[in-house]
Amino acid sequence: MSIEIDVLNGDSSWKRAESLMQAVWPRDVVEKLSWGHVKWAHADLRVLIDAPEDAAQPGLACHVGIYFRTATWDGRRVQIGGIGGVSTRQDCRGRGYASLALNAAIRTLRDHEAVRFAILFCEPHNQAFYEARGWHAFKGEVYAEQPEGRIRFEAMAPYVFDFTRKPRDGIIDLCGLPW
């Protein structure tokens, strides 16, 4: 059995990812979550893995969004990557697809040599998954842009993945830069 991993443009691949995202994160479920009110950015790139040919149902099995941002960390301008929208179809879970997609996303970010570290936000039940894959809890503050303006992001725990910098605390500001 072979697994095909695609890394595609975020906007043009949304149609392919949309039904998986809606199945994994239905609106009525998301509205009740601590992060259900958050306005998320669109992915710049998407890692997509199709279900294997012998799967009961064909189609997309797993999705990981990739983001590129200029941010500040403790007042210093820095290029960072982001991971979001990690989703695996219920009937495809436990087969390593999320790990494969996450690894492909990290390789893609690493190949973008300007990226100093990556950030993601996760719920408590997923923290061990990310820690086992080299992510570290960020103990500082994170600020993000939302429709109501710049906010301290506290809806989920921030985790970072090191490339050339090792942020563990301080302030990461994902909002527009002052310069």
Image (cartoon, grey):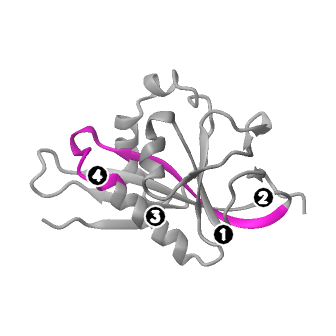
User: Of discs 1 and 3, which sits in the foreground?
Assistant: 1
Disc 2 crowd rating (10 Å Cα; few below 14, some 14-19, many 20+) is some
The structure residue drawn at horizontal position 18% and vertical position 50%, both measured from the top left corner, is 58
Sequence-earlier tag: 1 or 3: 3
Sequence-earlier tag: 2 or 3: 2
The structure residue drawn at horizontal position 81% and vertical position 66%, both measured from the top left corner, is 77
Sequence-earlier tag: 2 or 4: 4
Where is residue 35? Give x, y as percent: 58, 31
Where is residue 147? Give x, y as percent: 73, 36
User: Of discs 2 and 4, which sits in the foreground?
Assistant: 2
Residue 60: numbered disc: 4
Numbered range of the magenta stretch: 76-98
Q: Secondary structure at mark 1?
A: loop
User: Of discs 1 and 4, which sits in the foreground?
Assistant: 1
User: Of discs 2 and 3, which sits in the foreground?
Assistant: 2
> Which residue, given by chain and number where applicable, does mark 3 sit on?
105
Is there CB contact under 8 Å for labels 1 and 4? no
Res 40 seen here:
no
Alpha carbons under labels 2 and 1: distance apart: 11 Å
> Which residue, given by chain and number where applicable, does mark 2 sit on?
73
